[in-house]
Amino acid sequence: MKDAETDLLKLAALDADDLAVISAHLQDALLRAGDLAYLPKERRFALVARRFDWAAPDGVPPRRRLTGLHFERVLGVRARGVPRDAHDTVLSLLAVTFEPGEAPSGSATLVFAGGAAIRLDLECIEAAMRDLGPVWQAESRPSHAAGDALPLDAA
């Protein structure tokens, strides 16, 4: 069995299918509002999250990993339900979706539990997710209440 500290996941997304794979790995990731950053001059949006390791081998207790995600070629960012001044507010990421625009542009939406969402207007999909190293045992396995998901047009 591989050592959890050295078994780091690195993924890149250049299309909607790639982004769906990243979304699956980030489902139920927890992050603080203060761990989100939009850098307009660099046209980059980045976050650090504590992702639930859904791909952990059978028999391994539930665990979380510190993970970074960033999008390049970001033209604009809109948020709903994400507190700007409450940096310690914890958000639970449900999914990362993509709505195409005029090719290759479109919008990626980070959908959070409780109705919060962040929409990124993208020149094209160029994203990367990377585990940053620390792994720890999770207190429990995530579960979902009915109605957690948002329609895309609500973001």
Image (cartoon, rainbow, N blue to C red):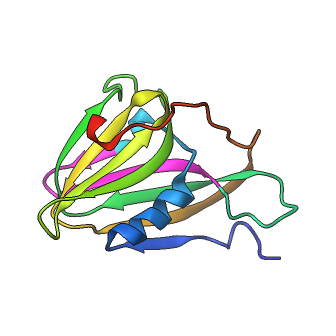
* In-front residue for pair 115/46: 115
Where are the magenta residues, as a range?
37-52
Q: Quadrant of the C terminus?
A: top left
Residue name at image x 83 percent, y 64 percent: 58
Q: Is residue 10 visible?
A: yes
Picture quarter containing residue 72?
Answer: bottom left
Say if the magenta span includes residue 39: yes
Q: How far from the left and from the top, in percent, is residue 136?
A: 73, 51
Q: Position of residue 79 (x, y in %)?
A: 27, 35
User: Is 38 a magenta residue?
Assistant: yes
Residue 11: x and y, percent? 47, 72
Residue beneath the point at 37% across and 54% down: 97
Compared to residue 97, the image places residue 153 above or below, namely: above
Residues 3 and 82: in front is 82
Q: Position of residue 6 (x, y in %)?
A: 68, 73
Q: Residue at x 73, y 52 (%)?
A: 63
On screen, 146 above or below 26? above
Question: Which residue is at a point 57% across and 70% down the rendered structure image?
Answer: 9
Residue 16 lies left or right of residue 27; in this view the side is left
| Residue, far bottom | 1
